[in-house]
Image (cartoon, grey):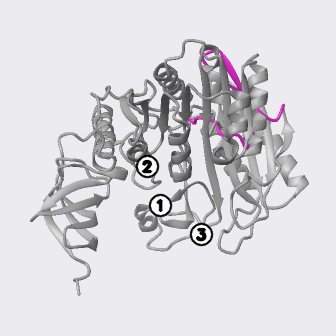
């Protein structure tokens, strides 16, 4: 039986591993460390898992700090769970992300790789998101300092902010968030102050009671601002009073919606948001393409780097105007539309029908007449009759969710055998797994990491695959 509450002392931190965990080695054992540590720190680690060859734990004491550290700029750093790498200079963040991509592709994919292009970092390292979702809770999370200030008592306070990691019923009140430009903080704080002053009830996730549930804000580079207030049940008088107060206080808002969600979970994809003010959607631009974004639409949450990512994708596709491009996991059609001027034809396929409806509307808005979009599973749709009608793809672009592609789809791609595949991924680990399967027919020609989310460990990666000549 292994001892519980084991603390390793004076552990020098040497690197970062996957998921933003720091890495150390002691007596031949690999140790993964959480707790805001930086390579160069020397720490004591309380182990939560302790295996023969590896262990996991949290830093509980710092003996010395790395000279690589910088001062975090956010007052909520270390508590809210976001922007975990604020204590690292941005140049260092990019180095570790680049290394993470290389490690995944080589260790998991066991691939022969060309020289990897330097990661494309963001020009905007603060205020770069175009969408944030905040949660109401009748139980605010209090820091140790706040508890001490109350003589050890834990007062019950309402909160509007972010969930605290690993505490599903606790929400940290956010005063200033640096992920979005103003007036996002003004919008959130105005709603919270009004709700507290007028004794509106904040949601209790355990009891599933209370009125105010979620607040979703989207701020586009076009200047349009869309706010969706999610409430548990209709209360017309209070709803109108609250939303009118918000519009009076923040006149820059272009659209306000509200969504009634009586369910046990927070998802709104099976609900119908109702327009209170404005046109009910926002418009965003990538280059000169305009996209309609509704309250349930998916769109890259970093518009600036989203454009960079799509430019890399278009460049890797190497289109000359004569190619048929299949855009898999096409969502609302943003990648397919972005590359459409360089292609003979774009065929977009997406499982979610509502996203396909948006894709068709976005194509019409941009006068894209050489793109068609279809709802369904690629494995089912792409049969002989489909190819006979639309043509075999010269280039396949695939942009799956974090879980990567289903093995059936990988096999379908091997069957389709397009000359090129451009694989856009938000998770290099699952991308590496899929690339290892595609290695049966394809070689990796180019690799380009793109940083979409500064101060986090998340990383996007674009890979160009070319079919081998002997197949």
Q: Earlier in the sequence, mark 2 or mark 1?
A: 1
Q: Quadrant of residue 330?
A: top right
Q: Is residue 289 magenta?
A: yes
Instruction: Depth check: give the residue in front, 470 or 101.
Output: 470
Q: Is residue 3 magenta?
A: no
Mark 1: secondary structure: loop
Residue 139's place in the image compared with 424, above or below, is below
Residue 281 located left or right of residue 220: right
Circles 2 and 1, Cβ within 8 Å, touching? The answer is no
Q: Could you give the CA–CA distance between mark 3 and mark 2, rounded to whole angstroms? A: 42 Å
Mark 3 or 2: in front is 2
Q: Residue at x 35, y 29 (%)?
A: 119
At a point 67% along the width and 68% down the height, the residue shown is: 204
Badge 3 element: loop
Packing grade of label 2 (10 A; few <14, some 14-19, many >=20) is: many
Q: Dot 3: few (<14), some (14–19), or many (≥20) neighbours within 10 Å?
A: few
Residue 136 percent location from the top left of the image: 66, 57
Q: Earlier in the sequence, mark 3 or mark 2?
A: 3
Q: CA distance from mark 3 to mark 1?
A: 19 Å
Q: Which quarter of the figure is the N terminus placed in? A: bottom left
Tell me the element at label 2. Answer: helix
Magenta residues span 279-301
Q: Nearer the viewer, mark 3 or mark 1?
A: 1
Direction front: furthest residue: 470
Residue designated by label 3: 156
The dot on residue 430 is: 2
List the residue tagged with mark 1: 165
Determine which quarter of the picture holds residue 169: bottom right
Dot 1: few (<14), some (14–19), or many (≥20) neighbours within 10 Å?
few
């Amino acid at each position: 039986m292994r001892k519980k509450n084991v603390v390793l002392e004076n552990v020098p931190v040497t690197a970062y591993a996957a998921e933003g965990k720091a890495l150390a080695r002691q007596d031949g054992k690999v140790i993964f460390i959480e707790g805001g540590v930086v390579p160069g720190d020397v720490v004591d680690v309380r182990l939560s898992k302790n295996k023969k060859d590896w262990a996991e734990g949290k830093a509980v004491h710092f003996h010395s700090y790395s000279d690589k550290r910088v001062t975090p700029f956010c007052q909520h750093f270390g508590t809210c769970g976001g922007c975990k790498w604020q204590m690292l200079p941005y140049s260092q963040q990019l180095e570790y992300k680049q290394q993470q991509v290389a490690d995944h592709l080589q260790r998991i994919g066991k691939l022969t790789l060309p020289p990897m292009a330097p990661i494309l970092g963001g020009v905007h390292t603060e205020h770069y998101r175009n969408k944030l979702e905040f949660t109401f809770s009748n139980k605010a999370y209090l820091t140790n300092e706040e508890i001490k200030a109350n003589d050890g008592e834990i007062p019950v306070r309402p909160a509007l902010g972010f969930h605290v990691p690993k505490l599903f019923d606790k929400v940290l009140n956010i005063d200033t968030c640096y992920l979005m430009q103003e007036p996002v903080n003004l919008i959130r704080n105005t709603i919270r102050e009004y709700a507290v002053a007028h004794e509106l009830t904040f949601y209790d996730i355990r009891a599933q009671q209370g009125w105010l549930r979620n607040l979703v804000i989207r701020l586009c580079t076009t200047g349009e601002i869309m706010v969706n207030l999610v409430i548990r049940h209709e209360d017309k008088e209070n709803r109108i009073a609250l939303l009118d107060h918000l519009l009076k206080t923040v006149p820059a808002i272009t659209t306000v919606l509200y969504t009634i969600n009586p369910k046990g979970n927070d998802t709104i994809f099976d609900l119908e948001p109702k327009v209170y003010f404005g046109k009910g959607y926002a418009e965003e631009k990538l280059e000169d393409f305009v996209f309609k974004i509704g309250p349930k639409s998916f769109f890259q949450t970093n518009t600036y780097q989203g454009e960079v990512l799509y430019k890399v994708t278009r460049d890797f596709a190497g289109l000359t105007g004569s190619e048929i491009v299949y855009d898999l996991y096409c969502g609302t059609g943003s990648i397919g539309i972005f590359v459409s001027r360089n292609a003979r034809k774009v065929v977009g396929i997406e499982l979610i029908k509502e996203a396909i409806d948006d894709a068709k509307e976005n194509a019409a808005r941009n006068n894209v007449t050489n793109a068609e979009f279809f709802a369904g599973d690629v494995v089912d749709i792409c049969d002989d009759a489909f190819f006979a009608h639309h043509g075999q793809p010269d280039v396949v672009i695939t942009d799956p969710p974090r879980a990567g592609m289903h093995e059936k789809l990988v096999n379908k791609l091997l069957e389709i055998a397009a000359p090129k595949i451009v694989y856009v991924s938000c998770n290099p680990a699952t991308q590496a797994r899929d690339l290892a399967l595609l290695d049966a027919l394809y070689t990796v020609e180019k690799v380009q990491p793109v940083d979409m989310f500064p101060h986090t460990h998340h990383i996007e990666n674009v890979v160009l695959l070319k079919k081998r000549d002997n197949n």
